[in-house]
Image (cartoon, rainbow, N blue to C red):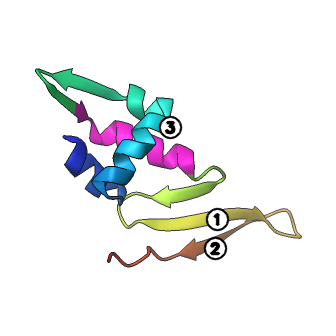
């Protein structure tokens, strides 16, 4: 997908997406060119988004973020946070 679609896919505006490209080598390096167009694969954008959340897990189908934290009894507790509404 091209830059405008990639920006929309990760939930930011085009100018923010271009700023991220200047600041983040992983995101910039995941692009490829077709002619003069710069493109990103959905799978690469998913991997980049997953890398941004660190110890949290993102359900890419629903946008739900799950924070995984140890409980007092040594069992993992999962707190689900619903996705933020789009403006």
Please report the residue visible at 39 percent of the width from the left and 57 percent of the height from the top. Answer: 60
Residue neighbourhood size for the residue with mark 2, other residues' Cα within 10 Å, grouped as few (<14), some (14–19), many (≥20): few
Query: Which label number is shown at residue 79?
Result: 2
Question: Horizontally, is 56 left or right of 22 in the view?
Answer: right
User: Residue at the right extreme?
Assistant: 72
Q: Height in image: 2 above or below 87?
A: above
Q: Where 81 falls versus 45 (above or below)?
A: below
Q: Residue furthest left?
A: 35
Q: Is 75 contained in the magenta span?
A: no
Question: Residue 76: x, y in percent?
Answer: 74, 63
Q: Is residue 48 left or right of residue 15?
A: right
Pointer 3: what residue? 23
- Residue position for label 1: 67
**Which one is earlier in the sequence, the residue at label 3 or at label 2?**
3
Residue in the image at 29% along x and 52% along y: 14
Mark toward the viewer: 1 or 3? 3
The residue stretch that appears in magenta = 39-52
- Residue at 66% x, 52% y is 55
Cα gap from disc 3 to disc 2, whole angstroms = 31 Å
Q: Secondary structure at mark 2?
A: strand
């Amino acid at each position: 997908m091209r830059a405008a679609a990639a920006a929309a896919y990760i939930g930011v505006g085009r100018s923010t997406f271009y700023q991220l490209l200047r600041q983040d080598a992983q995101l910039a390096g995941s692009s490829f060119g077709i002619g003069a167009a710069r493109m990103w694969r959905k799978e690469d954008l998913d991997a980049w988004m997953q890398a941004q959340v660190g110890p949290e897990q993102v359900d890419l189908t629903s946008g739900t973020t799950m924070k995984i934290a140890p409980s007092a009894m040594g069992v993992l507790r999962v707190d689900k946070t619903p996705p933020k509404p789009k403006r």
